[in-house]
Amino acid sequence: MEIGLESFGKPGEPEPGRVLRQEVGEITVRNKDMFDYIYSNNLYNQQGIASIYTRNAENLARNAPYQLKNEPNAIARIDLPPSGITIKSNWKVLEPTPSDKGWLSYRLKGTQVNFTNMMGRPTRLGNSVTEGGFMATSSCVSCHARASIMVPAGQPDHTAPALGVFSYDTLSEVGYTQSASGVPQKDWFHGSAVKPALRALQTDFMWGMPFFANPLVQPN
């Protein structure tokens, strides 16, 4: 059974925006294109992601500053497909239009596409709920640029989040740690000692991969 948004809002039925928020639509990356990319590149488990990190780390030690290229069955950079981002519905994939009643209860608070303005000052964007306590320094793009993994020493088949949301040398007036903002720093990702080293491998702005990829269970 398919139910379109125009069927909501009749007398005695729930308010349409509430239905859309709670049951119908959400921006998501959980569609077939996304799953195909994750599965075909072995990104659904820690061993697969760790192999990409190790491949880049070894190349950096041997061939810096030259970076690896993506090869069939051996990607060097996690680059999620744009087609993996859609509007998801519990009933069907929606292609909403401005006239859809469900949008009446939404208010766009802001959009952010650049790390800085034209004068080099960091741009800010935050939500008073999601970023409560550090909204004044919040930056969506800077935060998600830090989504990354690392391979712990002595655990070549495991990964861990490499960077966090916060800049721990900055506090608000009431003591909350504040968000990293502005242009991503190269030292977040690479060490610049005599022999350069990989510190963090970006996961293409998606925080889920560093936190939720699990190791494959090896058969006994």
Image: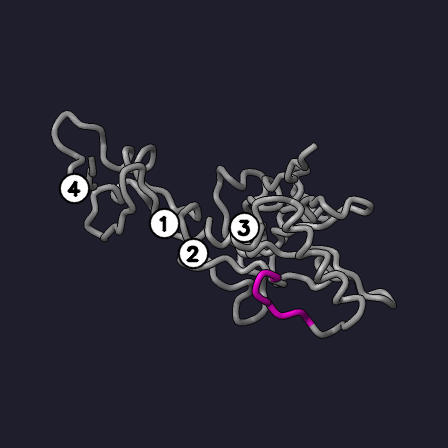
Q: Which numbered tag is attached to residue 108?
A: 1
| In this view, the mark in front (4 or 1) | 4
Q: Point out residue 217 in the picture as x, y percentages from the top left corner.
A: 65, 36
Image: magenta residue range: 67-74
Q: Which numbered tag is attached to residue 111?
A: 2
Q: Residue at x 76, y 67 (%)?
A: 60
Dot 1 amino acid type: Leu
Considering only order in the chain, which callout, 4 or 3, is on the residue closer to the N terminus?
A: 4
- Give the Cα separation between the discs numbered 4 and 2: 27 Å
User: Is residue 70 rendered magenta in the image?
Assistant: yes
The quadrant of the image that shows the C terminus is top right
Residue 118 horizontal side relative to residue 106, left or right: right
| Disc 3 element | loop
Q: What residue is disc 3 on? A: 206
| Disc 4 element | helix
Residue 81 vertical placement versus 220 (above, below): below
Q: Which numbered tag is attached to residue 6?
A: 4
Dot 4 amino acid type: Glu
Considering only order in the chain, which callout, 2 or 3, is on the residue closer to the N terminus?
A: 2
User: Is residue 170 rendered magenta in the image?
Assistant: no
Residue 160 in which image quadrant: top right
- Give the Cα separation between the discs numbered 2 and 1: 8 Å
- The foreground one among 115 and 10 is 10
Dot 2 amino acid type: Thr
Considering only order in the chain, which callout, 1 or 4, is on the residue closer to the N terminus?
A: 4
| In this view, the mark in front (3 or 2) | 3
- Give the Cα separation between the discs numbered 3 and 4: 33 Å
| Disc 1 element | loop
- The foreground one among 104 and 205 is 205
